[in-house]
Image (cartoon, rainbow, N blue to C red):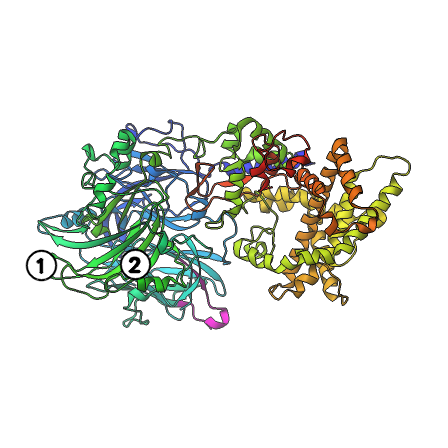
Amino acid sequence: MMQSFVSVLCFFALLTQVSAWGPRKSDHGPPGHYGGRQKHGASFTPDFVLKMTYENVSIGCQTRMSALINGTLFGPTLRLKPGRRSWIRVYNDMPDHNATIHWHGLSMRMAPFSDGSPSATQWPIPPDHFFDYEVYPLRSESGTYFYHSHVGFQAMTASGPLIIEDKAEPPYAYDEERIVFLTDYFNKTDTVIEKGLVATPFTWSGETNAVLINGVGVSVGETAGNGNCKLPVIDVEPGKTYRMRFIGATALSMVQVGIVDHDNFTIIEADGHYTKPHTEKFMQLTSGQRFDVIFKTKTEAELNGKTDYLIQLETKDRPKVYQGYGVLRYSKAQPQITTAPVTPPLTLSNKTYEWAEYALEPLVPNNFPQASEVTRQIHIDNRQLATQTTLWQLNGLQWNETSTPYAGDQPYLINIYENGPSAIPNYTAAMNNNGWDPTTLTWPAKMGEVLEIIWHNTGSLVNGNGGLDFHPFHAHGGHYWDIGSGNGTYNSTENEERLKNYNPVKRDTTNLYRYGEKTKSGDVSGWRGWRLRVEDAGVWMIHCHILQHMVMGMQSVWVMGDYQDITGIPAVDAAGYLHRYPGPRLWAASRLPWNIVSLQGNLAWKIRELHEKYGSVVRIAPDELSYTSSTAWKKIYGQRSPEFAKCFDGRGIAGPSVTNPAIRNGGIVTAEQEPHSRLRKAVLPAFSDRALREQEDILQLYAGKLMKQLRFSSENGAPQDMVKWFSLAAFDIISDLAFGQAAGCLDDAFQPWLQVIGARAQGIVRYQFAIYYGLEAWLEWLAPKAQKLALKRHGELTAGKVKRRLQQSENKRDFMSYILENPQADLSNADLVRMASAFIVAGSGTTATALSGITFYLCSSPKTYTALSEEIRTAFQTEDEISMASTGELKYLKAVIEEGLRIYPPSPSALPRFVPGSGEEIDGKWVPGGTAVGVHQLSAGHSEQNWTNSREFIPERWLEKSDISWPMQSCA
């Protein structure tokens, strides 16, 4: 049965690894792939295909020649899985225009050549060519993003939503999703706008003609209801909770969005990072920003027959305000609203600089750098001035995609790979020149620096008019911590006061606001602050995301790291990003070998075999490394900021509850950092020295029962199954301590609940497999009936035991009594059931395993057995002298127990964690963020690098510190 079950699950897992996109024929002939060395042969099939064309399209109730993706006004929604690489082929089918695609908000640390920044990381794709983009979202990057062209003004129409799915259940519950994709419409063509912005005399693009929702809107001068001119509609159902993914893909506009009688926008994510819930009455987005909100619709009773509610759109902080409308429509009903109102129904805010400012905090701690960690502060003035035309500069530097100093506009990243260290900008020259190197025109930063970047909004120098604009500044590469904004000039002392009780969320696009329409020409009138840990080596752009300002030069290219740092991710890496780590090729290519061995019950021993062959670090899956060193153990399990998060994606601890955050965080074994800390404080008194002393009579009772049963069973000299006896004894002890009730295992040498727990443990291995491949639904009918019944029976037995324990009146000193007496233990009945379940499953199994292993090795080592017997018999004359306190003084007994746990660990495999952020250094090598890492206990305990004569049972090694194993002992 086990073999057939493994085979069926493996078949379904294989299906999940096959791309849902079938083979495609291409009518594109040579020269084909553009932008560097060819990565794929002619037979390669990408995961997704995007085709850029230039077509006449209906937009804003008018028509316009526009750059399109896959023939639609905004491109298809792409949904990618974190921690997995996708190849996205982009064809440039525009006859007269170059193209690139930028994956807005993704760090792209794993594939820097695919960032899509022309002249920075790649050549633009010329007509009739294609480029294969390698997109590898980190596990920490689940969230809402978008993709868009990074050439000229094309992004106004050439863009689309990009969703990085949650690996497990998202931390917030909702019924459905809606994407709200906001774009601008300008009736001039891209070419006309671009030429005017760099022309002499300067010609402005004009203000936006319309703001569109999901490609639909009404342009200035047009009327909804005339012909095919319609208001945009968002359909919802009554009484549901929606996750609305707001994406600011506008070219110019800052947009406020309000809905009549719906002022409940609870923000849960900003720029791809989950936040603590924060509620606003309306939404506000500028170009490049994304916010996810929890939005609750009205019930049928609240609607009272009304189905349509106006959505009001307003642009802000521009010379002309555009007001547009849409409809929130319930149940796809017949339209009640088809035209725009004469008078705006909502009054939105002109104080744009107050919206959600100093309000968004991360859902989990994010290692925010304190002021004392800042190594360099950079002040950047943005200013508008007129030469022969009107342009924008950052600290005196104007840069756009034609500004590279290299022949043929060779991109900086390619130049670094080809020319080596000499291509890295001069750091000293940059420090003496307002932050940028005058030779390369780039801004250098060293790995490990903590930068504080202060953006200054200055009055325009054009004709001395002092005009002010807002600027949504966007950073490619690693995200920054936004430390706020304000009027006037930056005062670090005042801002640190505001940061005392505020932990900023990481962002990639935030606004340098204007606080008035004008100031004195050249004066600073407003600031925005960032803090950035320089951790992502590469060539990354930082620029204003207003397309007009980009064309006019408001961009900068940052070279982060030296040559060795930047080329640490190779240009061509078909074997994956962990290719430098040793391990079997099949395991590196697929997770199936890991799963198969795990399902067969041999994982710990197989991993030990791999470490013996490959060394102290082994690649055991495409995205997982196994370690055996003490330094790796301390890094992975001991580092607190940033913490390596537990894996709940089908490796480590897995069960039917781990994908549900609400249930998972109620269990002490599976809970994340904050709930785990709460639960740990609740149970701590149950494991104190005082509690153990008060529970000693329980331990002695069952030790006596065990010895009595062993004497009786061995009277005829029959061999004894010690695993069975220790399991019965451990279950009795843990049951009594957890529930205050005897289980009776040793009384009749049998306990059916033990069989239930055994079946449940096998089920956990299967759940690991199913969760990783998204096959939970299949498991419901593929899993053996006994497993499903065991899971159900275990829950019933545990809940019943807890209920009876809570009804007891006697003052019994068990785990539950200490938890219930603890004033810090604010636990529900459900919490108590989950806690007791963890005690009974984990406690009894590990105790029995440890006792069995130690007994085996004692019986196999007469010398050790004799030494231990002598220590015990010398210390005690009668059984009455034996107590927890007195046995605690037996040094050799302690050494025997430690050695038994080393050579035969109760939990022999790893409890892996995810590498936080963009990556960490482990044992001297950089490991990408989102990689699963762990220390397999059996492998570490049997490693000759950690222990002398590692396969021998030598308790004496624990009595002296001179052994090579001493560094590992502090971890063990």
Query: The residue under label 2 is which amino acid type?
Result: Gly
Q: How many numbered discs sit on the rendered protein?
A: 2
Check if mark 1's residue and mark 2's residue have beta carbons within 8 Å: no
Amino acid bearing label 1: Asn
Q: Give how far across and how far down residue 4 sits, in percent.
A: 66, 34
Front one among 468 and 339: 468
Q: Secondary structure at mark 2?
A: loop
Residue 217 is labelled as 2
Q: Which residues are magenta?
A: 292-308
**Closer to viewer: mark 1 or mark 2:** 1
> Which quarter of the picture shows residue 662?
bottom right
Q: Quadrant of the C terminus?
A: top right
In depth, the one of 698 and 279 nearer the eye is: 698
Rate crowding at label 1 as few (under 14), some (14 to 19) or many (20 or more) other CA atoms within 10 Å: few
Q: Which mark is residue 463?
A: 1
At x 71% / y 48%, what residue is drawn? 888
Alpha carbons under labels 1 and 2: distance apart: 37 Å
| Residue displayed at 26% across by 36% down | 424
Drawn side of residue 494 relative to residue 78, left or right: left
